[in-house]
Amino acid sequence: MIQQINLLKSKGILVTKLISKKEDLRKQWEEAFAKHLSKSQKGKIYFYQHLWHVFSYNKLSCLEEQKARDAFNKVKKNGCYIFYRDNQSVLLLENAKSLKAEDILKDVDDYLEDIYVVDTDFTWTYVFTHEEYCGPYFYQSKEE
């Protein structure tokens, strides 16, 4: 994670590491991007194992692969969060307009990880999965 933080800082992005914020962010992410699903539907798509299953099971229309990368690179980024499936750390990014898809390091502490990037208003999200054949995904709920 130190490598990720250093890369972001080198681009002029202000990075704050937040402790004990992951569960709150997961709940906010679920509310923003999966509230249309019932608890039963979430269970059937293994949502609580991988939040991104809302996209891979086509429960929410999104952009995928290169189209997702391109949309993420173009979206306005002031403040956003990066959080991970298995790592408790959350990164708050400010002045993030220079953040690009290729800046998201795919492994955290030598472990391939699901990585969620979401703006602080939860209007868009970019998800890089640990699966080579799934994603990345980009979803925007409204035009900025």
Image (tube, rainbow, N blue to C red):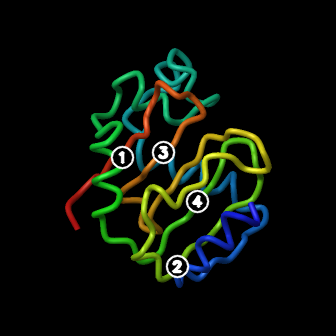
- Nearer to us of marks 1 and 2 is 2
Q: Secondary structure at mark 3?
A: strand
In space, the residues marked 4 and 1 are separated at their CA atoms by: 14 Å
In space, the residues marked 3 and 1 are separated at their CA atoms by: 6 Å
Q: Quarter of the image containing the N terminus?
A: bottom right
Q: Earlier in the sequence, mark 2 or mark 3?
A: 2
What amino acid is found at the position of numbered circle 3 in the picture? Val
Q: Earlier in the sequence, mark 3 or mark 1?
A: 3
What amino acid is found at the position of numbered circle 2 in the picture? Lys
Q: Secondary structure at mark 4?
A: strand
Q: Is residue 140 above or below residue 15?
A: above
| Mark 3 Cα-neighbour bin, 10 Å: few <14, some 14–19, many ≥20 | many
Q: How far from the left and from the top, in percent, is residue 57?
A: 40, 21
Would you name the residue on which mark 3 appears? 127
Q: Is residue 68 above or below residue 75?
A: above
Q: Residue at x 33, y 33 (%)?
A: 60
In space, the residues marked 1 and 2 are separated at their CA atoms by: 22 Å
Would you name the residue on which mark 4 appears? 82
Q: Quarter of the image containing the C terminus?
A: bottom left
Would you name the residue on which mark 2 appears? 11
What amino acid is found at the position of numbered circle 1 in the picture? Phe
| Mark 1 Cα-neighbour bin, 10 Å: few <14, some 14–19, many ≥20 | many
- Closer to the camera, 107 or 93? 107
Contact (Cβ within 8 Å) of mark 3 with mark 1: yes
Q: Is residue 103 above or below residue 41?
A: below
Would you name the residue on which mark 1 appears? 138
Q: Earlier in the sequence, mark 4 or mark 3?
A: 4
Q: How far from the left and from the top, in percent, is residue 83?
A: 63, 55
- Nearer to us of marks 2 and 4 is 2
